[in-house]
Image (tube, helix red, strand yellow):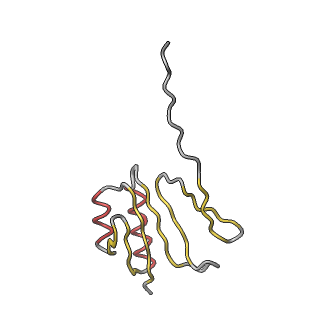
């Protein structure tokens, strides 16, 4: 049975956006929404995780959880989903530190 999915992407290769748009609609730049089977969803996510490169992606889909959905991520992100007693919460990680420049005297 098809169910709605949302995939949000940042800085991914154009060919990945093209592959996602075959099964979903890109409603806003980098945001893909569609209604697909669990098998198609999992296959799409496999493609995303293989080619995300330096970019990032998030998948939201229905699941038998208290919240009614599950979150999957790929790539480097500051927001990391964590399980807290059966609830998915989002933890913010620290921003990367800029390299300090050495001053010459």
Tell me where residue 58 appears, x and y as whole percent: 47, 64
Closer to us: 63 or 38: 63
* Position of 2 relative to 103 (above/below): below
Q: Position of residue 82 (x, y in %)?
A: 63, 62
Q: Quadrant of residue 48?
A: bottom left
- The residue drawn where x is 28% and y is 58% is 14
Side of 28 where 81 appears, left or right: right
Point out residue 94 in the picture as x, y percentages from the top left corner: 58, 47
Q: Residue furthest right?
A: 85
Q: How many marks?
A: 0
Question: Which residue lies most toward the top here?
Answer: 105
Q: Residue furthest bottom?
A: 1
Dividing the picture into quadrants, the one containing residue 97 is top right
Horizontal side, residue 25 vs residue 92: left or right: left
The one of 8 and 101 positioned closer to us in this rendering? 101
Query: Is 75 placed above or below 24 here?
Result: above
The quadrant in which residue 6 appears is bottom left
User: Relative to residue 84, is residue 96 depicted above or below?
Assistant: above
Of 83 and 50, nearer the camera is 83
Q: Residue 33 appears at what percent x and percent y? A: 38, 75
Q: Quadrant of the N terminus?
A: bottom left
Say which residue appears at 64% left-offset and 79% top-offset.
66
């Amino acid at each position: 049975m098809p169910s709605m999915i949302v995939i949000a992407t940042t800085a991914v290769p154009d060919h990945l956006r093209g592959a996602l748009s075959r099964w979903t609609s890109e409603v806003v730049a980098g945001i893909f929404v569609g209604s697909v089977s669990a098998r198609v969803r999992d296959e799409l996510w496999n493609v995303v995780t293989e080619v995300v490169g330096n970019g990032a992606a998030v998948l939201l889909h229905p699941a038998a959880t208290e919240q009614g959905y599950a979150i999957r991520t790929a790539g480097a992100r500051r927001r990391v989903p964590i399980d807290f007693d059966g609830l998915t919460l989002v933890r913010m990680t620290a921003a990367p530190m800029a390299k300090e420049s050495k001053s010459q005297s």
